[in-house]
Image (cartoon, rainbow, N blue to C red):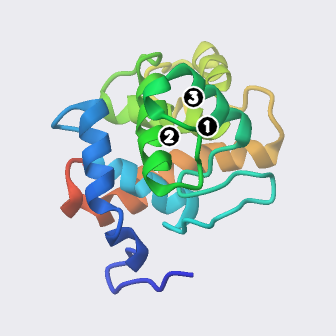
Amino acid sequence: MSVACAQGIPRDAQRHQATLKREAQRVWGLNAPVATFAAQVHQESRWREDARSPVGAVGLAQFMPATSNWIGGLYVSLGDRAPTNPTWALRALVTYDRWLADRIKAVDDCERMAFTLSAYNGGLGWVYKRQRLSKEPGRCLDATCTINPGVTPASQRENQHYPEVILRRYEPLYAGWGAGSCS
């Protein structure tokens, strides 16, 4: 298990900084929100390559087997599906986030990323359902993402918390890594 640095960034993160930046810029361009992706990995696995969830998600990006198979089949450029391989996991995370972001409408880049993160955590269909029920369908944070579209209360809390903690708590920690979506 990694030991946290004084700034709150796990030491294991530093080993993956260059790879994350390279993969993010390859998929998102030179202004890729690297700080956001770093914050997402922080939330998913605390940068532990051997992370495993009780429901079967694995690796830095905590991909479920079905999701890694699907994204790997959709983007053959990802190569062999290897969610426990750090480079593959980071490449797949930024690719999947791009795929999601391209399908989401929002009032600005910060809100689009909040919806993207919500979809990464709980599924794109739930984002669409929340947006249909919302008076502010282009805003996730403190608005649409607080709407329960029919999931269990525990799932709603987790999915609402996911983009908030990434964008508001962890993204600022990684500001030195590159641009963020909301900072």
Counting from the top left corner in percent of width and height, residue 11 is at 39, 79
Tell me whether circle 2 and circle 1 mark residues in contact (CB < 8 Å).
yes
What label does residue 109 carry, if any?
none
Q: Is residue 182 visible?
A: no
Q: Amino acid at mark 2?
A: Asp
Q: CA distance from mark 2 to mark 1?
A: 6 Å
Which residue appears farthest toward the left when viewing the image?
30
Which circle marks residue 142 in the picture? 2
- Residue in the picture at 80% in, 44% down: 153
Secondary structure at numbered mark 3:
helix
Q: Can the viewer see residue 4 in this picture?
A: yes
In the displayed orientation, state which residue is furthest to the front: 80
| Mark closest to the chain's N terminus, 2 or 3 | 3
110 relative position to 99: left or right: left
Does 13 appear above or below 152? below
Q: Amino acid at mark 1?
A: Thr
**Mark 3 and mark 2 in contact (Cβ < 8 Å)?**
no
- Dot label at residue 71: 3
Spatial CA distance of label 3 from label 1 is 28 Å
User: The N terminus appears in which quarter of the rendering?
Assistant: bottom right
Gap in Å between the C-alphas at discs 2 and 3? 30 Å
Residue 162: x and y in percent read: 56, 49
Q: How would you rate the neighbour count of disc 3 (Cα within 10 Å): few for under 14, some for 14-19, many for 20 or more?
A: some
For the residue carrying disc 1, how many other residues have a C-alpha within 10 Å: few (<14), some (14-19), or many (20+)? some
Look at mark 1 in the image and give the residue it sits on.
146
